[in-house]
Image (cartoon, helix red, strand yellow):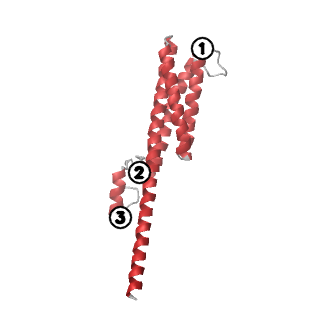
Amino acid sequence: MTQKLADKAKTKELNHSERQRAEERQYETKRAVEEGIRTCYVMLNTASLDYHSELNNFWYALGAGGVTDDSRSRLDAARREHRARYSEAQMRIPDEVLASADDVHRRLSRMYGVLKRLDGGIPPRREGESLEQAHAQIVECWDRLSEMRQAMRQSLGLSLTQPDAAASDHVVLPSDDMARGQRGGGTGGRS
């Protein structure tokens, strides 16, 4: 009888240890996936901003008649880097963030096409492809870049404002949430 109780206790202890190891592996896997997504966001955001900046620089050079092989090369390199980061993001990031990234990607690609046609002396394919209108699109793209970055931050749980906090003009920092949770409030509003 004592042996059976000892065996049962040992089996229970082994099962508990196995469950605990499985939970730890699951937690580590989840952390690795989250870190991979965060890294992907950083790389895509950086590549998008660089591509946008190079489009803006190219627009200025085109308007001043000072487009050089170097400026073309920098623009093409920024485009390739953005395409690589966007391709990776298509396989890694959640759909709600991908929708915003896709919008940015299409806008940047459209601007690239317009500026390259203007640089090559090729007539616009459609109305709205003038140098002035290209600049308006570049400026407007800042809002899309900001929306993409905000979607990324929300996906990571890093958004600085929350709906009820915005109404009270109070910025809720992650440390504020933790403090409220420790006090038992955890309502997301002011305490």
The CA span between labels 2 and 1 is 51 Å
| Quadrant into which the C terminus falls | bottom left
Residue 140 — which label?
none
Q: Position of residue 167 (x, y in %)?
A: 43, 49
Q: Nearer the viewer, mark 2 or mark 1?
A: 1
Where 168 sits versus 10, above or below?
A: above
User: Which residue is at the front of the view, 158 or 161?
Assistant: 158
| Near-viewer residue (160 or 36) | 36
Q: Which residue is disc 1 drawn over?
A: 120
Residue lying furthest front in this view? Answer: 3
Q: Is residue 148 above or below residue 53?
A: below
Instruction: Specify which label sits upstream in the sequence, 2 or 1.
Output: 1
Dot 2 and dot 1 residues touching (CB under 8 Å): no
Q: Amino acid at mark 2?
A: Ala
Give the residue number, with chain letter if any, for mark 2.
165
Residue at 48% of width from left, 17% of height from top? Answer: 71
Task: Look at label 3 and name its amino acid.
Answer: Gly
Label 3 secondary element: loop
Residue at the extreme bottom of the image, as rendered: 1
> How far apart are labels 3 and 1 at the CA level?
64 Å
Measured in 3D between alpha carbons, the distance from the residue under mark 2 to the one under mark 3, in whole angstroms, is 18 Å
Query: What residue do we see at 50% from left, 22% from top?
Result: 75
